Image (tube, rainbow, N blue to C red):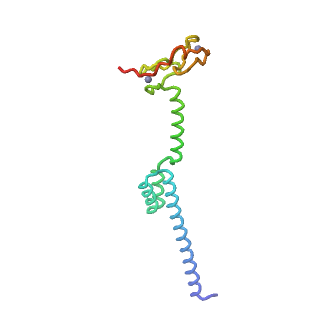
Amino acid sequence: MPPLEDIMVIAERGLRVSVTILATYLVAVWIATIWWTFRDIRARSGDVWLQVTATLLVAVFNFPGLLIYFILRPQQTLAQSYVESLEEEAWRRSVGDANACPACGQLVEPDFLFCPACQARLRRVCARCERPVLLSWKLCPYCGSMTGSAAPAAPVTPHVP
Ligand SMILES: [Zn+2]
Ligand SMILES: [Zn+2]
């Protein structure tokens, strides 16, 4: 049976080691959350003030701060927004080239001869097959008649009231 003093010393040593481990663990978690928040907000916003504010919020309040950050952070990362804007741009370009009036940008049907908004001439009717063809086309793509050389393409001019 060891003396009581020895038991006290062992217990105190054990307690000190546990407290040190716990403190180290909490500090590691604290630093990890701050680092994670800093990287997350940098991926979501280029605003330096927002980055500093979000990181400080988590540094000071930690888990409650992290909760607030989750609620308030921008929904999309910058990479996602970039991809989305590229897709939107590509979509607008593919649709816009085919279906927009070159004079005013109004969406028009592919067989419209005139723009309903600005009255610009968009297409003419093929003399042979009577299908709408673009003014710039040299020949009718439907029947192959050389309508372009016979009737020179009139420039697209918006109607001024
Ligand atoms: Zn137009
Ligand atoms: Zn034709």
From the viewer's perspective, is residue 76 above or below residue 128?
A: below
Name the residue located 56 percent from the left edge and 19 percent from the top edge: 138
Name the residue located 58 percent from the left edge and 12 percent from the top edge: 129
Looking at the image, which residue sits at the far right? 1
Name the residue located 54 percent from the left edge and 18 percent from the top edge: 133
Ligand 2 positioned in quadrant: top right
The quadrant of the picture occupied by the C terminus is top left
Q: Position of residue 2 (x, y in %)?
A: 62, 88
Looking at the image, which residue sits at the far left? 161
From the viewer's perspective, is residue 25 above or below residue 73?
A: below
Looking at the image, which residue sits at the far top? 128
- The quarter of the picture where residue 90 lies is top right
Q: Position of residue 123 (x, y in %)?
A: 50, 18
- The quarter of the picture where residue 24 lies is bottom right
- The quarter of the picture where residue 22 lies is bottom right
Q: Position of residue 62 (x, y in %)?
A: 47, 61
Q: How many marks?
A: 0
Name the residue located 41 percent from the left edge and 55 percent from the top edge: 49
Nearest to the observer: residue 88 or residue 152: 152
Looking at the image, which residue sits at the far bottom? 3
Nearest to the observer: residue 34 or residue 43: 43
Q: Position of residue 6 (x, y in %)?
A: 59, 86
Nearest to the observer: residue 55 or residue 121: 121
From the viewer's perspective, is residue 35 above or below residue 125?
A: below
The quadrant of the picture occupied by the N terminus is bottom right
